[in-house]
Image: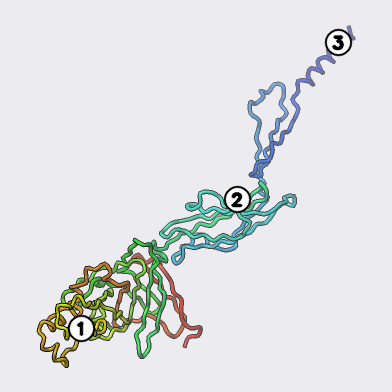
Amino acid sequence: MEAFLTFMIIIALLFSFASSPVKKTAVVDQEPAIQDVIYTASLVQPSQTIQSQPVVQQQVVNLIDTYIISGPEQGEILKDTNSVVFEFDANILSDSLKGKLYFETKVLGFDNDWKKSRAKKRTITLPSGTNQYTFLVRAKINETFDLTPAQRTFTLNVSPYFKKVKISTIKYESTSRPALITLTTNLNQDEEINITGWSIESKNGKIIIPQATEKYYHYYGSQNNEDIIIKKGERIYLSSGYNPLGRDRNFKDNKCMGYLTNSFDFPVSISKKCPEPTAQEVSHLDPCCQQFILKLKSCQYPDYSENADVRSDKQCTEYIDKNLNNIGCFMNYSQDKDFLGNNWYIYLHGKNILADDCYDTLYLKDKNGFVINTYPYGKPVCK
């Protein structure tokens, strides 16, 4: 009887030992994000119900730390450039991490995906306009990368006309000439821009670009000023001098303007190449008249007071007085496709914003005050 009881106790102990749960650990393969996920099955008493899902403990280990050395600061607003430069580097936090160091960068709102490079610097040219961007950078070795990329958020407030027009040259005021600022264009073939209302600013003040006359001819009361619409290849001259044609009579040059140089002294030179009569056009006139006309210089007002043959020839003098002057030229050629030149002339009537005694910067701004171009100039030592 005692032997039977001993046998039953041994059987019960074996059964109890076999049914007790044992702790086991499974380590999941490491993901590229460098994280260790450990599943642990805890000891469970026979009377407890075993859970259908394991208890999850998540532990994140970052093995690389990326940081930004230079570039737009957090929250900075850029107003005078659409080109940004970021420099960055990384600290390796584990001696076990071996391999070549790479960097991946991404600009939210500009890049579609990460850009991979071994360089520790990236220059980015962003679209002009008003936009907010976030720059991200993370270091990477093999498949291990920084889980918390370094980042900077900044705003670009740059004119949509940025660098489409630039301040190309300046000339200081002297005893013999007024100050001069020259603007040039960088436009596409069919692109046009309205620059009336733009400003050029310096520490000495501000110039507002006014209206002007595109097709000018010299007859008082006949001009209609309009906004200045510039095209590819055109120049804009802003002179601090006085307009010999009168205030607010700014203009674009044309192939008849040269006639006005006979009567007016322009601070900024104007082309003296006017349409010249051909032999065929004057063939109906007397030979003496033809000879007189064909020997005239381009844009020259004819003075026939000393030429008796011409002075006494009514048909000849009528032809000369009607055609060989600014108004006659305008009437004959203003509809030609090549009538207009490429230069606009704006006179500021004594307004000079150039500083001639120290460093300064000119800012060309659009109507909204956004910077289009800058022009630093000056001398290293102030007087």
Q: Is residue 103 above or below residue 69?
A: above
Say which of marks 2 and 3 sits in front: 2
Estimate the x, y position of residue 214 in percent, counting from the top left.
Answer: 25, 71
Spatial separation of the CA atoms under disc 2 and disc 3: 67 Å
The answer to which quarter of the image holds residue 85 is: bottom right
Q: Are marks 2 and 1 in contact (CB under 8 Å)?
A: no
Say which of 305 and 57 sits in front.
Answer: 305
Amino acid, disc 2: Thr
The residue at which mark 3 appears reads as: 5
Say which of 8 and 370 sits in front.
Answer: 370
Q: Residue at x 50, y 57 (%)?
A: 153
Q: Is residue 120 above or below residue 309?
A: above
Q: Is residue 345 above or below residue 107?
A: below
The residue at which mark 1 appears reads as: 293
For numbered disc 3, what is the local secondary structure? helix
For numbered disc 2, what is the local secondary structure? loop
Amino acid, disc 3: Leu
Left or right? Give the position of 332 relative to 39: left
Amino acid, disc 1: Ile
Say which of 175 and 198 sits in front.
Answer: 175
Q: Residue furthest front?
A: 287
Badge 3: residue crowd in 10 Å (few <14, some 14–19, many ≥20): few
Q: Residue furthest top?
A: 1
Badge 1: residue crowd in 10 Å (few <14, some 14–19, many ≥20): many
Q: Which mark is residue 378?
A: none
Left or right? Give the position of 330 relative to 149: left
